[in-house]
Amino acid sequence: MNVRNRLPALLMVMTALMSAQQPVELTPVVSKPIERKLALPGELMPYQEVAIHAKVTGFLDRVLVDRGSLVKKDQLLATLDVPELAAQRAEAEAKVQAAEAQRAAAEARLASEQGTYERLQAASATPGAISGNELTIAAKTVDAARAQVLAVESSIKAARAAAKAVQDMEQYLQVTAPFDGIITERNVHPGALVGPSGDQGQEPLFRLEQNTKLRLVVAVPEVDVSGIEVNAHVTFTVPAWPGGTFNGAVARVGHSVDAKTRSMAVELDVANARGQLAPGMYATVNWPVRRARPSLIVPASAVVTTTERTFVIRANNGAAEWVDVAKGASAGPDTLEVTGALMPGDRIVKRASDEIREGARLK
């Protein structure tokens, strides 16, 4: 083979030797926990919220609160008028009185029959004075009178239970607040016919929200859920208060990833004693991203990205070894988080490129 034919092969060998002889700077792969802030959108919600309906159907008599009213637990909000209840109460009370009168008559009859029986029993001690049949009849009469008293007692209990039910129903004529909060919605006025929530098309009388304490709902991306820490304090801002910073504590984790958004709902408890925040406000949350395990950190210049792969070059017994990696988040100035078949302490080329071929000797 002449020199002209061998020239391309000689050039390739010389290029490989020159690449292998180029000095490279090695740096170790570092393992450390990283923490960064991620701006996530959130929405403020009431800590408690309820639509207040009437428990019975009736006409609204008085409305004592309006939109924006601050109320306390068990405070009277409105009263209803149900004329039928007054008639039902009078009827139930009359039945109780009638049953008690029947009991008095039955007890008097029992006492009379008991006295007759006792006198006959005393007379029966004299032979021939009272027949045995008369004594037996008197005893049966006493038993019947006693059974009558017991029956009347049962009817009294039933009448009293009915009267108590009407009284309980009358308590429903007073609509009260189930917890401290603010009335955010009022839909009725005096004279309106209202009823329970099961009535078709029936709007609530009021809507009550607890705003002294709020829930901040944040959708945390799936890749960042492993570092969620309950009770961790997180800061956020809202457009309504430019320059102001608020904070809340992580209280509840959804433990379920939304299939559409690939995120998990996390709730923060936010104190709002001064009332600066309101439900429905959108917040920008400075979410702290923490990894459950330490991350592998490498210089950004050590990661090579081509059309086919992303890799770093590890020194393996003095030879270049391409190790595929996946890029993660920025870990600081000129450093990256990576995942791949690397170990802490592995020495890699600090300024790598695909010109350093795999297997080349590193100086």
Image (cartoon, rainbow, N blue to C red):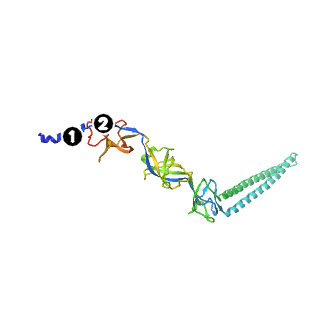
- The extreme left residue here reads 2
Quadrant in which residue 208 is drawn: bottom right
Measuring from the top left, give residue 298's x and y in whole percent. 36, 40
In the rendered view, would you say 92 is above or below 129? Answer: below
Q: Which residue is mark 2?
A: 315
Quadrant containing the C terminus in the rendered view: top left
Q: Position of residue 20 (x, y in %)?
A: 24, 37
Q: What SS does tag 2 mark? A: strand
Three-letter amino acid code at the position of disc 2: Ala
Tell me the kind of residue under disc 1: Thr
In the image, what residue occupies the spot 75% across and 58% down?
A: 97
Helix, strand or loop at mark 1: helix
User: Could you tell me residue 279's position as x and y percent?
Assistant: 52, 55
- Taking the image as drawn, is residue 93 in sight? yes
Please state, as top left, top right, bottom left or bottom right, where the N terminus lies in the image: top left
Residue 251 visible in this rendered orientation of the protein? no
Q: Residue at x 15, y 41 (%)?
A: 7
Q: Which residue corresponds to the image point at 38% horizontal and 38% vertical from the top-left?
A: 30
Q: Position of residue 329 (x, y in %)?
A: 39, 45
Residue ID at (64%, 55%): 75
**What residue would you read off at disc 1?**
15
Residue, far bottom? 191
Q: Quadrant of residue 32?
A: top left
Position of 70 compared to 266: left or right?
right
- Circle 2 residues within 10 Å: few <14, some 14–19, many ≥20: many
